[in-house]
Image: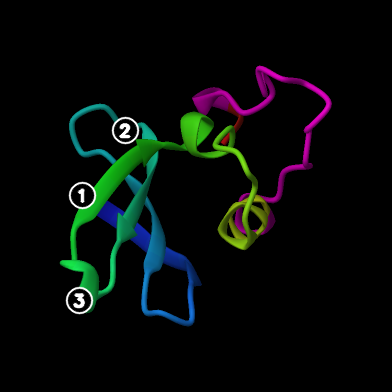
Amino acid sequence: MHDIKQFASSSNGDRWFLATADETQEPYVLHKANEPSGGHETRTPVREFLNIKPFGPERAALLEILGVGDDTEDAAQSSYSSSSL
């Protein structure tokens, strides 16, 4: 993993990062849970992350650093393909 950038954190210590997979060059969101809840890490493709409901502040933060609009009218979020990120 390279090109990792934190874009959001919560008051409970969870953190979200934008990263790129070395093998595929595809962007994904790395979520690092806080230590009291186990500190688990999950990786979610950016397109999938942007479609997780309910939308939270971490989604808005990701949209901001990506510099893309919020296309909530499009259920498939087709504008969030890896080629546009």
Q: Residue at x 48, y 75 (%)?
A: 10
Per the model, the C-alpha gap separating discs 1 and 3 is 22 Å
Mark 2 or mark 3: name the one nearer the start of the chain: 2
Coloration mode: rainbow
Helix, strand or loop under label 1: loop
Query: Magenta region: which residues?
Result: 64-83
Q: Which residue is tagged 1?
A: 1
User: Where does the image place residue 55, in percent across and percent down from the top left?
Assistant: 65, 47
Query: Dot 3: few (<14), some (14–19), or many (≥20) neighbours within 10 Å?
Result: few
Instruction: Say what amino acid the circle numbered 3 marks.
Output: Glu
Mark identifier at residue 35: 3
Instruction: Say what amino acid the circle numbered 1 marks.
Output: Met
Q: Is residue 52 magenta?
A: no
Q: Residue at x 16, y 67 (%)?
A: 38
Query: Dot 2: few (<14), some (14–19), or many (≥20) neighbours within 10 Å?
Result: few
Q: Which residue is tagged 2?
A: 25
State the predominant SS element of the stretch in magenta: loop
